[in-house]
Image (spheres, rainbow, N blue to C red):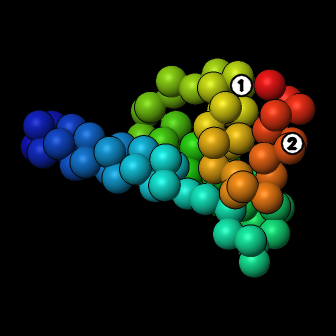
């Protein structure tokens, strides 16, 4: 039973990590919605026991998900 749970948890973690990497800010979506989605994925990963992100890594991931229209902000924050 424990092995099956661990396997399911690992698969869920992989799925959520892929979603986190693939999440992008669509130009039609508000930044608030995007940040909410991003934080929701991070919270789900933490609920599954994956707490590898400090604030700096979270910020880097968030900046990576912004569209090209936000390129100036990303450059300024570097």
The image quadrant of residue 17 is top left
Vertical arrangement, residue 26 with respect to residue 58, above or below: below
Give how far across and how far down residue 71 sits, in percent: 78, 47
**Camera-side residue: 19 or 41?**
19
- Tag 2 and tag 1, C-beta contact below 8 Å: no
Judge whether residue 75 can be spotted in this image.
yes
- Residue at x 82%, y 34% (from the top left corner): 75
Q: Pick whichever of labels 2 and 1 is earlier in the sequence.
A: 1
Which element type, helix, strand or loop, lies under badge 2?
Answer: helix
The residue that appears at 68% across and 62% down in the rendered structure is 25
Q: How far separated are the C-alphas under marks 2 and 1?
A: 18 Å
Left or right of 63, for residue 7 = left
Q: What residue sits right under mark 1 in the picture?
A: 55
Q: Quadrant of the C terminus?
A: top right
Q: Is residue 38 left or right of residue 11?
A: right
Say if 21 sits above or below 32 in the image. Answer: above
Q: Which structural element holds mark 1?
A: helix
Q: Nearer the viewer, residue 37 or 75?
A: 75
For the N terminus, the quadrant is top left
Vertically, is 34 above or below 53?
below
Coordinates of residue 9 in the picture (x, y in percent): 28, 44
Q: Which mark is residue 33?
A: none
User: Which residue is the site of mark 2?
Assistant: 73
Residue 38: x, y in percent?
64, 52
In-image side of 65 versus 17 (left or right): right
Residue at (75% x, 77% y) in the render: 28
Q: Depth check: 27 or 7 in front?
A: 27
Q: Residue furthest bottom?
A: 28
């Amino acid at each position: 039973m424990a092995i099956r749970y661990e396997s399911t948890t690992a698969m869920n973690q992989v799925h959520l990590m892929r979603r986190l990497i693939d999440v992008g800010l669509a130009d039609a979506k508000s930044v608030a919605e995007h940040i909410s989605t991003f934080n929701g994925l991070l919270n789900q990963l933490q609920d599954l026991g994956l707490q590898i992100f400090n604030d700096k890594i979270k910020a880097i991931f968030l900046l990576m998900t912004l569209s090209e229209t936000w390129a100036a902000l990303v450059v300024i924050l570097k």
